Amino acid sequence: MSFIRATGVHLPSRVVGNDELAAAVGEPAAWIEQVSGIRERRYAAEGETVVTQALSAAQACLDRAGVTASDVSMLLLSSGSADRNVPGPAAQVAAELGMGTAPALDIAIPSAGSLWALCLAKQMAPLAAGGKVLVVASEIMSRRVDRFAEGKNTAILFGDGAASALIDASAGALRLGDAVLQSDGTGAEILHMTGSGDAARLHMDGGSVILRASRKLPAVTQELLTRNHLSADAVTRFVMHQANGNLILKVAATLKVPADRFFQNIARYGNTSSASLLIALHEFLEETPSPTGPVVLSAFGAGLNWGAMLATPA
C-alpha cells in the first residue's frame, strides 16, 4: 500500500489580477473571469526558476512530514516549463535537496504529469528502501505564453507555482488506490510546446482542449468508479487539475454531482499546469486533514494524456 503522508507548496509572491492583464489582451477584466473562472494568478519573480520553486515546495513537504531528504528513495518531478530540456530539473532538485545518488525522474507532461507521478510513486514506494517517494510538480508557465490580444485565450489562464507530496508505504492521511490512465497522441497538436529555453512557447487550441477534456474526464472518472463499485454520489471530494473554472463545472454536471463537491482554487492561482493538481490537493488536505470518504484525483493535459485516481481514508 501507499499513502499521501504530507504535502507542501511554493506560491510566488507576485499576484497578477485580471485588471493587469486586461489591457494586454484587449478585453475587460470581467470577461477574463467569465470565460475562465480566474480572478488572479501568481507570477514567478526574476531569479525564480522551476528548480528553485521545486526545492521550496519539496522542502516544505519534507518538513511537514518530519523526514529528511536522505530518507527518500526516489524523486519524481513533473514540469513542462523548465528552462532546460536535457537534463531536466529532477536530478538537480534531488542533488540540491541532499538525496545523494537516489534516482530522480523527469515527467514532462504539462497539466497531467503530477497525476502520472502519483500513480508511479504509488507503485514504487512499497518497493523502495525506506518506502518513501517524493513527487514534485513545478511550473513557470507565465514565461511560456505571450500576453497579447491574438493569444488572449491562452495568456489569461496560466500562473506559476509548485507543490509536492511525500508518498509513504506505511502511513498517511489518504491511501492511494486504483487509477485509470489514458493517452491519445492523435490530439498532440491541440496542446504542445515548441522551442526550448526562453524561446519555448505553449500552443493551445483552447476550444478543442475544453471540448475533449469535458468528455474524457467524466468518462475516465466514471470508468474508475464503476470498476471500484462506487457511484459519483459516494465520492466525498473531487480534486481536479485546475484548468478552467467552466471546465470543472462541465465535468461536475456530466457526473451529476453538485459543483461544490469539486475542490476549486483556480480563482486565486489560475492554471498552474502540472502543479495545479498538487496545489489543490495540498489545500484540500489543509481544509480536510482527515477525509471521511473516497476522493478522486483527475487531470487532462498534453500528450494528450488524461486519467483519474482513487484515494481513500487511511
Image: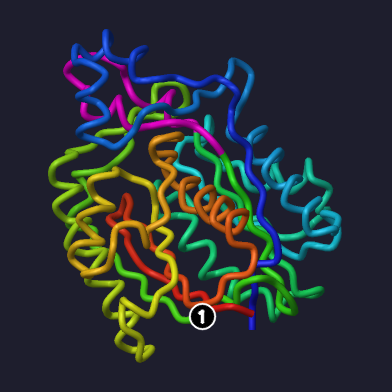
In the picture shown, does residue 162 fall above or below 277?
Answer: above
Image coordinates for residue 135, horizontal then vertical, percent: 62, 57
Image coordinates for residue 88, horizontal then vertical, percent: 57, 43
Quadrant the C terminus occupies: bottom right
Residue at 31% of width from left, 19% of height from top? 146
Image coordinates for residue 304, horizontal then vertical, percent: 27, 56
In the picture shown, does residue 93 fall above or below 223?
Answer: above
Q: In this orientation, which residue lies closer to the viewer: 83 or 232? A: 232
151 in magenta: yes
Name which quarter of the figure residue 272 lies in.
Answer: top left
Magenta region, residue range: 140-161
Q: How many marks?
A: 1
Q: Secondary structure at mark 1?
A: strand
Quadrant the N terminus occupies: bottom right
Q: In this orientation, which residue lies closer to the viewer: 208 or 295? A: 295
Image coordinates for residue 12, horizontal then vertical, percent: 59, 27
Residue at 45% of width from left, 35% of height from top? 269
Q: Residue furthest top?
A: 23
Name which quarter of the figure residue 5 lies in.
Answer: bottom right
Q: Amino acid at mark 1?
A: Gly
Residue at 30% of width from left, 26% of height from top? 156
In the picture shown, does residue 55 fall above or below 156?
Answer: below
Left or right, 14 with reference to 296:
right
How many residues crowd mark 1 within 10 Å: few (<14), some (14–19), many (20+)?
some
Disc 1 designates what residue? 177
77 in magenta: no
| Image colouring | rainbow
Left or right, 270 with reference to 126:
left
Left or right, 266 with reference to 51:
left
Residue at 75% of width from left, 79% of height from top? 170
Name which quarter of the figure residue 168 lies in.
Answer: bottom right
In the picture shown, does residue 271 fall above or below 43?
Answer: below
